[in-house]
């Protein structure tokens, strides 16, 4: 292969990220992301499923291992109860125990880390995941979904929890808001029950 010929991984990465970047949703360039060498893990936390879709797409496109970050004790089913619990956990710096950890994180050179923004920051369970693993020398590429307010302080939180890792530019996209969906459904139900 000639030095300027793209590798299969570069082609896959470009086809995944280029349409997203063209829409203004991504700040990671396909060329930069394609320079990832070695074994890749996609780890994600998702409450409503939006981040799961993004993480699954990246994992399928790059043929990586996929790991779901799950708290030992699940967050409440009720959205508003989850918001309250997350605010309390974040406020006191609590990192909930994880249901499981990655068995051999040392074998990965890069980790795509998917999570939603909660209260303008990284969810407490994702902070637990970062604390539970040694990411020294690894590239971390954030995959962030949010409800319209952007990244908040998430990148500084990631940098603080993984000081020995190389933090790449984040992919971020606004995803449907669960709160907005609940409000619209309840408004609609109120109208049809009159």
Image (cartoon, rainbow, N blue to C red):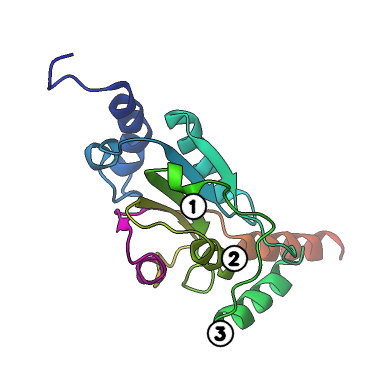
Q: Which mark sits nearer the N-terminus, 1 or 3?
A: 3
Label 2 close to label 1 by CB (< 8 Å): no
Horizontal arrangement in the rendering, residue 192 relative to residue 168 (left or right):
right
Q: Which range is magenta?
A: 155-171
From the top left corner, tell me how far across and down residue 187 is, in percent: 73, 65
**Comparing labels 2 and 1, the label whose residue is closer to the camera:** 2
* Secondary structure beneath label 1: strand
Q: Residues within 10 Å of mark 2 (few under 14, many from 20)?
A: many
What's the CA distance linking mark 1 and mark 3? 22 Å
The secondary element bearing badge 2 is classed as helix
Could you say which disc has been placed on residue 12 in the image?
none
Q: Which residue is mark 3?
A: 91
Look at the image and tell me in which quarter the N terminus lies: top left
Instruction: State which quadrant residue 71 falls in.
Output: bottom right
Residue shown at the point (55%, 40%) measured from the top left:
66
The percent position of residue 15, horizontal first and vertical second, equals 34, 29
Instruction: Tell whether 190 sits left or right of 57.
Output: right
Rendered image: mark on residue 125: 2
Q: Quadrant of residue 182?
A: bottom right
Give 26 or 39, whichever is nearer the viewer: 39
**What is the crowding at mark 1: few (fewer than 14 residues within 10 Å), some, or many (at least 20)?**
many
State which quarter of the image contains the C terminus: bottom right
List x then y, in percent, for residue 85.
68, 77
- Looking at the rendered structure, the secondary structure element under dot 3 is helix
With 82 as the anchor, is 127 left or right in this view?
left
Inspect the magenta stretch and tell me whether residue 160 lies in it. Answer: yes
Q: Is residue 21 above or below residue 63?
A: below
Which percent across, then down, holds residue 118? Answer: 54, 69
Per the image, the residue denoted by label 1 is 114
C-alpha span from label 2 to label 3 = 13 Å
């Amino acid at each position: 292969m000639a030095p300027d010929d793209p590798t299969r991984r570069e082609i896959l990465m470009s086809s995944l990220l280029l349409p997203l970047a063209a829409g203004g949703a991504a700040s990671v360039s396909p060329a930069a992301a394609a320079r990832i060498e070695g074994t890749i893990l996609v780890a994600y936390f998702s409450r409503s499923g939006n981040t799961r879709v993004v993480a699954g797409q990246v994992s399928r496109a790059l043929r990586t291992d996929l790991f779901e970050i799950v708290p030992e004790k699940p967050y409440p089913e009720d959205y508003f109860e989850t918001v309250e619990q997350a605010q309390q956990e974040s406020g006191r710096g609590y990192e909930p125990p994880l249901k499981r950890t990655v068995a051999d994180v040392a074998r990965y050179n890069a980790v795509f880390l998917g999570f939603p923004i909660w209260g303008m920051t990284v969810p407490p369970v994702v902070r637990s995941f970062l604390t539970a693993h040694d990411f020294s020398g690894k590239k971390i590429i954030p995959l962030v979904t949010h409800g319209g307010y952007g990244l908040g302080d998430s990148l500084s939180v990631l940098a603080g929890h993984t000081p020995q890792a190389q933090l790449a530019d984040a992919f971020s996209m606004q995803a449907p808001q669960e709160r907005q969906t609940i409000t619209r459904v309840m408004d609609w139900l109120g109208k049809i029950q009159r």
